[in-house]
Image (spheres, rainbow, N blue to C red):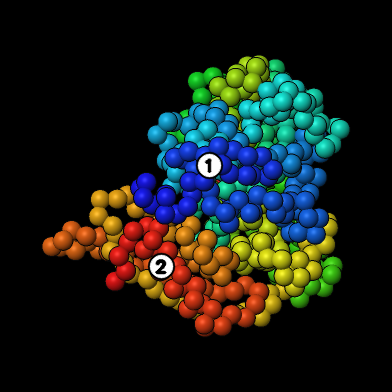
Amino acid sequence: TRRQSEARGTSPKSLDVLGTTYATDSWTNTPPAILAKTGRDLLHQTSHPLAILKELIFKEFPTFAHYDSLSPVVSTYQNFDSLGFAQDHPGRSKTDTYYVNQSTLLRTHTSAHQLQLLAAGSRDENGILMQAKNSAAAPRNERFLVAADVYRRDEIDASHYPVFHQMEGVCTFSREEVRDTARQATAAKRQDKAGKVDCPDQAAQMIDTTVVGDGNPIQAAHSAEEAAFLVDNMKQAMNDMVVHILTKAVAAQQSSGDACAPGNQPQFPVRWIDAYFPFTSPSWEMEVLFQGEWLEICGCGVMKQEILNQADMPDRIGWAFGFGLERLAMLLFGVQDIRLFWSSDPRFAGQFSPGRINSFRPFSRHPSCAKDVSFWLPSGSTFHENDIMDLVRETAGDLVEGVKLIDSFTHPKTGKGSRCYRINYCSMDRNVTNEEINGVQELVRKRMVEQLGVTLR
Ligand code: FA5
Ligand code: MG
């Protein structure tokens, strides 16, 4: 694979990311088209749906510190080690993560900033106190939100893109505070039962909180009461946020007489699925039912106590979540294809304005065009599907709508592996001629031979 990386031209002596120069090494695998995304700064374009959603979520948590300008370049320690990722965790591999060099990478999630922001004073690498935007925030960063762009080598389809955005939420409590609140709540519940019947509010109607399965352990460092309090508090906070925002979206569409508004009574059932993260336990994924499908919008759980101890907060316990902003924004703004968020076509950008949720009106759909490519794998080399994904993206840019494996077999005599991929080309914002697509496909085929060493069939 030395041959591969040399041919791919990913071994320049240094890489420039956002004005800083980094030395490269055998881990460097971030291609130019990905580097170019680091400067797009979609979260600060006030009329962009992702920026609008960011502001809406910030408003839901007024007492939390808000961060939205942290650099995407973080240390391998921040992204993985500080969160307890095992040395052999698949997320660390070069096939999944964009490395600048072995010790530096483009963050794969906003959780990379948890420890750094919790740690007292939250100073940057130069020892400078990082200022949160809202002054109501607690000085020790006991509660905060981080909105940011994140980067992953991943498959290509309508809901996956190698750059997307997340909103991290971290909320901690002193153990004392939890004990008092938990006792008060129990007492209040007893009183409630004796008196009136609980009146389910709108949130309760829309949200179905089902805990599926068990085997999602409470940490030894937490009592049953503490864990129960945190899980309850977390799910309530997340439900409230999602319901408020979805309700606001529907209200806005109805009052503006938006033809694209969904039916009168919004239905956004939510469910919780047991999950695993190295930095939370117990953990869940939150899914919302949208257009007949359960869409995973968030991971969350009770923070591993080791992280709080590391941040010099052994007296505190907490929960954390990480929302995928694109997934929520697609639902709120009716955007069907994740590539559209990166479009600079005024017919996209011009449809939105700060603080407003409205349904996107798709401009005319351009025809899509499928091209297959079949090849023999190079013998004795490690081939990873994400190498194809990156190569197609680098070559075709946002003309590519999806890449799918459609056939795979091993020759019975030679033992050689064969693959066939179908590349779907479709522009999201302009007309494309057949010649142009044929030209791109030719270039993809040529580069597959040069850079991946495959033999076309
Ligand atoms: C995480 O990234 C965890 N850091 C979340 C977390 C935070 C858990 C705090 C616990 C505590 P995950 O890989 O599942 O988890 O991603 C979180 C969300 O990001 C997903 O639910 C999904 O909404 C979104 N997401 C993941 N991959 C993509 C992608 N390729 N394109 C768009 N959105 C994505
Ligand atoms: Mg996930």
Mark 2: secondary structure: helix
Give the quadrant of residue 430. Answer: bottom right
- Residue sitting at x 58%, y 66%: 398
Residue holding disc 1:
13
Answer above or below: position of 156 versus 146: below
Which residue corresponds to the image point at 57% horizontal and 33% vertical from the top-left?
75
Residue 363 screen position, x and y as percent: 69, 77
* Image spot of residue 178 (x, y percent): 68, 23
Q: What residue type is labelled 1?
A: Lys
Q: Which of 447 and 45 is in front in this view?
A: 447
Residue 318: where, in percent of width, then height?
64, 28
User: How far apart are labels 1 and 2 at the CA level?
Assistant: 25 Å
Residue situated furthest front in the rendering: 13
| Of 132 and 412, the residue lying toward us | 412
Q: Residue 41 — which label?
A: none
* Disc number for residue 446: 2
Which tag, 1 or 2, sits closer to the chain's start? 1
Asked whether residue 333 is in view, the answer is yes
* Residue 365 vs residue 209, the one in the foreground: 365
Q: Where is residue 128 in the image (x, y as percent from the top left)?
A: 76, 25
Vertical relation: 436 (above or below) 400: below
